[in-house]
Amino acid sequence: MRIYRRVSRKKYLHGKRVYEYERFYVPVPKRFQHLVKPFARRDLKVKVEQEPEGFAVKIQVRPSQKQTRKA
């Protein structure tokens, strides 16, 4: 398995300047997709922790924030 890096470039001011940012993608192997699928389209809280031989990614469901409207 590999971690993929993508650099995006957006032009602004009619092409005079370029805004760049990078994103990292971690593909989920097929054997784990049944664990990940219920979390699709939900707000998640992601925490990355360093370990002696790499890193660990901890993902939790972010509690829904219901907006109350005052009259």
Image (cartoon, helix red, strand yellow):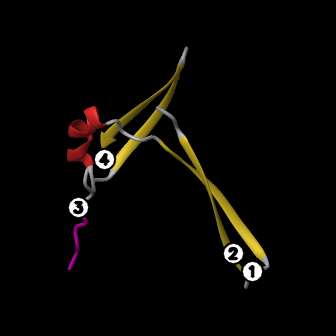
Question: Of the numbered discs in the image, which one, if any, rests on residue 66?
Answer: 3
The first of marks 4 and 1 along the sequence is 1
Other-residue count near label 3 (Cα within 10 Å), few / some / many at <14 / 14–19 / ≥20: few
Q: Amino acid at mark 3?
A: Lys
Q: Amino acid at mark 4?
A: Arg
- Residues at discs 4 and 3 in contact (Cβ within 8 Å): no
Give the spatial CA distance, label 3 vs label 2: 37 Å
Question: SS for tag 3?
Answer: loop
Give the spatial CA distance, label 4 vs label 1: 38 Å
Give the spatial CA distance, label 1 vs label 3: 41 Å
Q: Which residue is mark 2?
A: 11
Total labels: the figure holds: 4
Position of residue 29 measured from the top left corner of the image (x, y, whole percent): 34, 35
Of circles 4 and 1, the one toward us is 1
Q: Residue at x 23, y 36 (%)?
A: 35
Other-residue count near label 2 (Cα within 10 Å), few / some / many at <14 / 14–19 / ≥20: few
Give the spatial CA distance, label 4 vs label 2: 33 Å
Return the residue found at the far right: 16
Give the spatial CA distance, label 2 vs label 1: 5 Å
Q: Amino acid at mark 2?
A: Lys
Of circles 1 and 3, the one toward us is 1
Q: Residue at x 41, y 41 (%)?
A: 27
The first of marks 3 and 2 along the sequence is 2
Query: Does 52 sit above or below residue 18?
Result: above
Other-residue count near label 1 (Cα within 10 Å), few / some / many at <14 / 14–19 / ≥20: few
44 lies left or right of 17: left
